[in-house]
Amino acid sequence: MPTETINSPADLELERAGFYWRARGDLRALSSRALDEAGFANAFSTRAGGVSPFPENDLNLAGFDEDAAENIHENRRRFLSLLEGDWKLEACWQVHGTQVRVARSTEEPAPDAVGESERCDALTTDLRRVLLGVKTADCVPVLLGDAPTGACAAVHAGWRGTSRSIVARALERMKDEYGTRAQDVVASVGPAALSCCYEVGAEVCEVFKENFAAGADSLFTPTRDGHALVDLHEANRRQLVAAGVRAENITLAPLCTMCRTDLFFSYRREKKVHGRTGRLLGVVGRR
Ligand SMILES: [Zn+2]
């Protein structure tokens, strides 16, 4: 397994949080030990080690309207090479909704499927060697694995998806399709815009108060008038616990995409400056 020596204080913090780096050359991705141990290959990508001009040598893994398809395919090939064996990647056209798609076939996608035209924000399967992927650049990627049934899920949870409890909907779908019990699920929440940086307006606070169970206020830290910092990691963690996932089975990557634009793409930091930004992938699959 291509892993790097853990040797800096930041890496020790990651190690304590239950993560380690997979790396080869400039390429690196973050993996959850608990998901590995439950039988699920998994990785959260970084921007390092690719071929896209964002501005250079960036590992952009999606966004066919903003990058050349050959760049994205080469970057995906490199990223997937960090995981052992052959995998078929399944992704979708994300729309900040709450649809959960079940990946049922290992058939190769049609050649024109590069746009990942099915609209959904979470994917689940129990098929082996199928890698479920969600694209993010500040939104929260959540990966779920259920060892007893072999089912897993990848969830894209921005503020809209989080406010509508998309992780709970993904768990519900795993239960319906595969008989998953929440207490068996291991969850890993990846790098995202965290509460140090992610400021939202009053309309977002209002949506959370309407859609979120009691305690929405404690997810917000007021800043300037009509604005607050929101903690989407904590919001997703609470939803997982409320759905029956054991707190000790949930790991949160202590990395903020807005603080660490050296490592990650950040829509909020980069879109204004460059007019575009790359996309990260969070992936999980049954070995
Ligand atoms: Zn930050």
Image: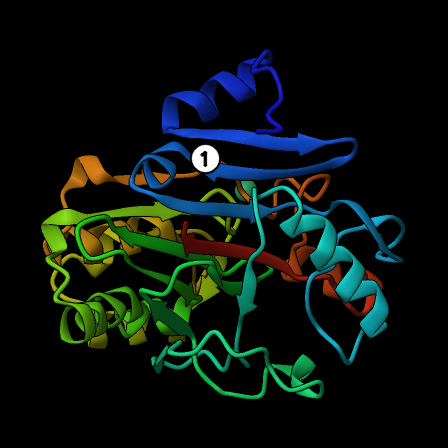
How many numbered circles are shown? 1
Q: Is residue 15 above or below residue 249?
A: above
Q: Quadrant of residue 275?
A: bottom right
Residue 124 location in percent, x, y?
A: 34, 69
Residue 138 location in percent, x, y?
A: 55, 57
Find disc 1 in the rendering and name its residue: 254
The secondary element bearing badge 1 is classed as loop
Colouring convention used in this rendered image of the protein: rainbow
- Which one is nearer the viewer's eye here, 62 or 73? 73
Residue 221 location in percent, x, y?
A: 36, 49
Residue 114 location in percent, x, y?
A: 68, 80
Q: Is residue 275 above or below residue 84?
A: below
At 65% across and 45% down in the image, what residue appears? Answer: 46
- Which quarter shows the N terminus? top right
- Disc 1: CA contacts within 10 A as few (<14), some (14-19) or many (>=20): some
Q: In the image, what residue type sits under mark 1? A: Pro
User: Does residue 135 show up?
Assistant: no
At 75% across and 52% down in the image, what residue appears? Answer: 59
User: Does residue 148 show up?
Assistant: yes
- Quadrant where ligand 1 appears: top right
Q: Quadrant of residue 175?
A: bottom left
At 69% across and 61% down in the image, what residue appears? Answer: 61
- Which one is nearer the viewer's eye here, 40 or 202? 40
- Which one is nearer the viewer's eye here, 18 or 274? 18
At 59% across and 11% down in the image, what residue appears? Answer: 7
Q: Is mark 1 within 8 Å of ligand 1?
A: no
Left or right of 2 in this view: 143: left
Left or right of 223 in this view: 186: left
